[in-house]
Amino acid sequence: MGRQSDSVRCRSFRRSVFVKRISKISAIVLTKNEEAGLGNTLENLKDFEDVIVVDSLSEDRTLEIAVNHGARVVHFEWNSEYPKKKQWSLENANPLNEWILLLDADEFPTASLINELVDLQYSIESSSHGAFDINLLYRFAGRYLRHGHVVTKRSLLHIDRASFPVINDLDAPGIREVEGHYQPETAFKIGKLRNRLIHDDRDPVSSWFARHNRYSDWEAHLRLNQRLRKEIASKRTFKGRMFDMLPLKPILFFGYAFILRGGFLDGRAGMDYALALSAYYWQIGVKYRELVGLAESEI
């Protein structure tokens, strides 16, 4: 009994000491002019043996930084048709593995998530899952928000079992070459990882508002088509579907994020983030009502 226990401990020790690399999961990072933060992202992906940067004609030092960190670079130029960038990457980046951690340029795993993935890779190849959801640890206005509203992304994907749906949004403004705010689909099981991805948004707050101004154009446009709106809502997380149905969403969301979910514990940054997202939902509503009025005036 003692020898068997010692043997198990010895194998566990060898595994924890010598197996630090992630060799059965590839990381794909989507970029376009990301020189400011890409180096930090790739440094935090150094435990992955296969890292691919899919780049959209960057004009800064993005490609140089990618190559210097040992990443493979795949060039993407959108042709204004499907597939958009995320699905195109799954189909054309030629990763070494069937499982992909799909990341924006300002996202990377926490150390705890790295350890979870190191362990998961031993069972993931025989898994019946098609994808895994991961919560984000969001950085806003220079501070990591540990409370309040938590964004969940379906970021760990099996390349043959999960895919981004074709949404009829090619004529929608605001979001063009990258898929909008909906999740990839799979007919297989969907798991949930315990640890988080860091969303390390280092851009100024003005950039956040500029992006969400464009996103709200896309959302408002989709609301004009109720069938399309319901289709996209069905491809979001459970939280996303619930938020989509809420009346008085800006007010209710602020109460949910800042009070019910404890956003106030993040101090001023928590309040600013809850207000910013509430204003985003208000903006979608204002733009939608404007579009409805314009449509009715043309009848």
Image (cartoon, helix red, strand yellow):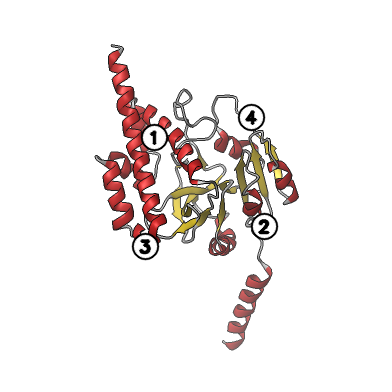
Q: Give the percent coordinates (x, y) of residue 112.
A: 54, 64
The residue under label 1 is which amino acid type?
Answer: Ile
The residue under label 2 is which amino acid type?
Answer: Lys
* Residue at the outermost left position: 247
**Where, quadrant-wise, is the C terminus in this rendering?**
top left
Instruction: Please name which of the two marks, 2 or 3, marks the residue nearer to the observer.
Output: 3
- Between marks 2 and 4, how big is the CA–CA gap? 27 Å
The local crowd at label 3, few if under 14, some if 14 to 19, many if 20 or more residues have their Cα within 10 Å, is some
Compare marks 1 and 4 and give the one earlier in the sequence: 4
Please give the residue where the numbered disc 4 appears in the rendered image: 77
Compare marks 1 and 2 and give the one earlier in the sequence: 2
Q: Which mark is residue 188?
A: none
Please give the residue where the numbered disc 1 appears in the rendered image: 232
The local crowd at label 2, few if under 14, some if 14 to 19, many if 20 or more residues have their Cα within 10 Å, is some
* Residue at the outermost top position: 299
- Between marks 1 and 2, how big is the CA–CA gap? 35 Å
SS of the residue under disc 1? helix
The residue under label 3 is which amino acid type?
Answer: Leu
Instruction: Please name which of the two marks, 1 or 4, marks the residue nearer to the observer.
Output: 4
Compare marks 2 and 3 and give the one earlier in the sequence: 2
Compare marks 3 and 1 and give the one earlier in the sequence: 1
SS of the residue under disc 3? helix
Q: Give the percent coordinates (x, y) of residue 89.
A: 60, 38
Compare marks 2 and 4 and give the one earlier in the sequence: 2
Q: Which mark is residue 265?
A: 3
Q: Residue at x 64, y 29 (%)?
A: 77
